[in-house]
């Protein structure tokens, strides 16, 4: 549990937070910057202690020196069993309506200063490297901490800690380096001029021995104080549509998408026998002029019979169950065309920025009016869901119009209210990893987790995998990550297939006409098109959580769980082309409690029994990957699952014992593999006796039950 240390006497008026007797945060102080002025540090005048039922609060009052008395800031540290919440209330007390009106700087009005962190043994910082995306940073020298850091995890000899800045109803907080001494600064800003007061939850701090519990715990702690801004992932509903295999038009057609191409691709997928259940019509379908949305329906030159005709054909002729369309959070990249009929008819629901962009009104009620009109029209054309792009542009459009949190809240609340009404809440959020977007989507459950997959980039998989892996660590507390589409015929096709298998999120591909390889799709899905999803969002394993597999000669390893087994995917993404060495152990899956497990590797179909404390070494060549299942040892017979699926164990619906028989219920038939100390005396599937064959690996056996349809009950009779 965190405790409060009043160290003012020995630490120049600062305070500190400790964990288990060890100082975690020290040198805490506050400074302000007014518009057009220099930054100045405030003096700590008093500390007020307030006891609660479960938490203790310490209110620190900071203000200018006795002569100025222009700024007063109250920093409240609420120390609770699950973590620390830091609240800020600041005010410019000498703002004069009849004179020079002073206000907080819109970019960095308040800073909370934190001294150098002690005994750092590793760091994972996720920072906003573009307006729309985040990526990891690993340097333990916090003087190099990037600006716009949205999550900071570090390790000390005693525990792991995560400092999570918060975006509240108006103000956003993020982290940056603070001076040469290696300290941190929590930057608090509104993005709007003229603000003379600030009241916000600035950050939460969590600690413990298991780093994978911290993001969800911190998000839950923060949301307790934010009155329904959003929900943690564990309280959201994963959309039914995205539980099935999809195809997206973007990397197949880019902006040249049209009805002819879509129907030709759908015919090809049907001919290949691939059970694609949804199609996303991405950017390029809508009627646009000057990068602005011009109409509700599709571009008449590309879709001469209208959007409804294309969707009806996809569903009736080619068995596509659901069709989605793409748009941006402003309608199109530069908003809505002011001369369009749409703009004239919906003008009461639209807002014109000072730059002249027309967009949905940044008010939840009025903005809903626009989305309700357009989404209602799209739903009548047969559209079932939407992908909403360019979300982090909300702040770019509305900077100096509204505080950053208020603008994001209005945009997402209006959008999601309409999507709930027309599309059963099914949205793929995209280009929205800015903190204000993450913290302000009310109920949507899926959000893009990385920058784009770019199939033409020869070594693009390295950065793509890195971002998805390490962003998922913190982003997964709110959302199932969309790890983007991929090409099934590509120099990185196997790696991309394995990456999606372990992600826990949607699976969809985007091959152009004539370019789909079913062998890169079928291992990810069941026969009905349902994707084989792992139980949670994937994260880097403990041994690489705070190291860069891009810069160091180590494999990137991601862990998840499925069917009672651990799942570990390993990739060679190091920029050096030499082999990398790694190892698999039970410690790679923190949720695993078994004392021993069978480690089964998908591509080699080899297995070995591993006890806790043991490890299995492996090597990866450049651009090579492996996929391991860690199946808890069940003794004489241990079912592994379907060998023709990447996440083999997911097909195991139930396991039980009947006398000398191990009974297994599979979701469907296939090549079933199991480990056994002795060859079985018989194997039956749905009562039918089947031949079994020993694998090339000792103690591993295979049974072909692929001819059986529906669920399969297997009986493995021990010798």
Image (spheres, rainbow, N blue to C red):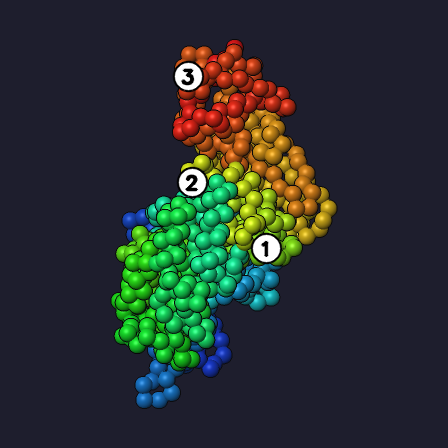
- Look at the image and tell me whether residue 300 can be seen: yes
Name the image quarter holding residue 403.
bottom left
Q: Give whichever of 462, 209 is nearer the camera.
A: 462
Q: Is residue 489 above or below residue 336?
A: above
Residue 603 x %, y %: 61, 34
Q: Which residue is mark 2?
A: 530
Does the CB distance between marks 1 and 2 fall below 8 Å?
A: no
Circle 2 residues within 10 Å: few <14, some 14–19, many ≥20: many
x, y percent for residue 221 = 37, 51
Whether label 1 touches label 3, CB < 8 Å: no
Q: CA distance from mark 1 to mark 2?
A: 25 Å
Q: Which residue is mark 1?
A: 455
> Which label sits on residue 615?
none
Q: Is residue 299 above or below residue 496?
A: below
Q: Residues within 10 Å of mark 1 (few under 14, many from 20)?
A: many
Which of the pair 162/716 is nearer the observer?
716
Distance between the alpha carbons at the discs numbered 3 and 2: 27 Å
Q: Secondary structure at mark 2?
A: loop
- Give me the C-alpha separation between circle 1 and circle 3: 47 Å
* Residue 687 numbered mark, or none: 3
Direction from residue 505 to residue 573 in the image, left or right: right
Estimate how packed mark 3 is, as few (under 14), some (14 to 19) or many (20 or more) residues with alpha carbons within 10 Å. Answer: few
**Image spot of residue 419 (x, y percent):** 32, 57
Q: Earlier in the sequence, mark 3 or mark 2?
A: 2
**Vertical side of 290 occupied by 550: above or below:** above
Which of the two discs, 1 and 2, labels the residue nearer the N terminus?
A: 1
């Amino acid at each position: 549990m965190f405790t409060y240390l009043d160290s003012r006497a020995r630490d120049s008026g600062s305070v500190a937070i400790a964990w288990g007797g060890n100082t975690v945060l020290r040198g805490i102080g506050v400074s302000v910057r007014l518009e057009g002025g220099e930054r100045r540090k405030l003096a700590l005048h008093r500390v007020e202690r307030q006891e609660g039922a479960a938490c203790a609060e310490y209110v620190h009052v900071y203000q200018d020196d006795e002569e100025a008395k222009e700024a007063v800031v109250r920093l409240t540290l609420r120390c609770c069993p699950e973590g620390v919440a830091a609240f800020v209330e600041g005010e410019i007390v000498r703002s004069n309506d009849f004179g020079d009106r002073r206000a907080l700087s819109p970019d960095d009005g308040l800073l909370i200063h934190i001294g150098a962190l002690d005994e750092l043994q590793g760091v994972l910082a996720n920072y906003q490297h573009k307006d729309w995306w985040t990526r990891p940073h690993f340097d333990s020298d916090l003087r190099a901490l990037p600006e716009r850091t949205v999550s900071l995890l570090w390790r000390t000899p005693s525990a792991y800690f995560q400092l999570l800045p918060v975006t509240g109803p108006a103000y956003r907080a993020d982290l940056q380096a603070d001076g040469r001494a290696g300290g941190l600064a929590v930057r608090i800003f509104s993005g709007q001029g003229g603000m003379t007061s600030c009241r916000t939850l600035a950050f939460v701090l969590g600690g413990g021995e298991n780093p994978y519990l911290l993001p969800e715990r911190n998000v839950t702690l923060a949301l307790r104080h934010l009155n329904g801004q959003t929900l943690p992932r564990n309280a959201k509903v994963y959309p039914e549509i995205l539980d099935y295999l999809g195809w997206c038009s973007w990397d197949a057609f880019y902006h040249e998408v049209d009805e002819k191409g879509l129907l030709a691709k759908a015919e090809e997928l049907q001919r290949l026998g691939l059970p694609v259940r949804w199609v996303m019509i991405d950017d390029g379908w809508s009627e646009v002029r000057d990068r602005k949305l011009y109409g509700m329906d599709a571009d008449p030159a590309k879709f001469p019979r209208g959007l409804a005709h294309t969707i009806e054909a996809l569903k009736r002729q080619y068995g596509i169950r659901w069709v989605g369309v793409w748009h941006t959070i402003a309608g199109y990249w530069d908003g809505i065309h002011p001369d369009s009929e749409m703009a004239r008819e919906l003008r009461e629901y639209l807002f014109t920025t000072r730059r002249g962009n027309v967009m949905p009104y940044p008010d939840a009620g009025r903005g809903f009016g626009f989305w309700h009109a357009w989404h209602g029209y799209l739903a009548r054309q047969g559209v079932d869901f939407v992908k909403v792009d360019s979300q982090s542009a909300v702040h770019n459009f509305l900077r100096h119009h509204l505080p950053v949190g208020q603008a994001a809240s209005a945009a997402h609340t209006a959008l999601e209210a309409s999507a709930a009404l027309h599309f059963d809440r099914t949205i793929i959020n995209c280009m929205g990893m800015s903190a204000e977007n993450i913290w302000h989507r009310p109920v949507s459950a899926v959000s893009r987790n990385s920058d784009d997959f770019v199939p033409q980039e020869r070594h693009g998989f390295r950065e793509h995998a890195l971002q998805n892996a390490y962003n998922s660590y913190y982003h997964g507390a709110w959302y199932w990550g969309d790890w983007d589409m991929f090409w099934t015929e590509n120099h990185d096709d196997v790696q991309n297939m394995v990456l999606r298998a372990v992600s826990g999120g949607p699976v969809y591909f985007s091959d152009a006409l004539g370019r789909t390889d079913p062998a890169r799709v079928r291992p990810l899905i069941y026969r009905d098109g349902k994707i084989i999803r792992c139980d949670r969002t994937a994260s880097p394993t403990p041994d690489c959580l705070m190291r860069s597999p891009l810069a160091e000669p180590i494999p990137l390893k991601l862990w998840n769980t499925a069917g009672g087994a651990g799942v570990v995917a390993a990739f060679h993404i190091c920029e050096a082309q030499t082999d990398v060495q790694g190892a698999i152990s039970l410690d790679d899956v923190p949720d695993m409690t078994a004392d021993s497990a069978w480690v089964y590797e998908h591509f080699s179909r080899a297995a070995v029994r591993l006890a806790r404390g043991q490890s299995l070494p492996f090597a990866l060549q450049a651009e090579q990957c492996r996929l391991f299942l860690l199946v808890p040892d069940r003794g004489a017979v241990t079912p592994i699952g379907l060998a023709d699926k990447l996440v083999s164990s997911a097909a195991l619906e139930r396991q039980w014992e009947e006398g000398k028989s191990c009974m297994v219920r599979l979701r469907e038939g296939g090549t079933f593999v199991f480990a056994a100390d002795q060859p079985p005396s018989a194997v039956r599937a749905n009562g039918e006796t089947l031949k079994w064959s020993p694998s090339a690996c000792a103690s591993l056996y295979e049974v072909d039950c692929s001819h059986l349809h529906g669920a399969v009950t297997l009986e493995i009779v021990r010798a």
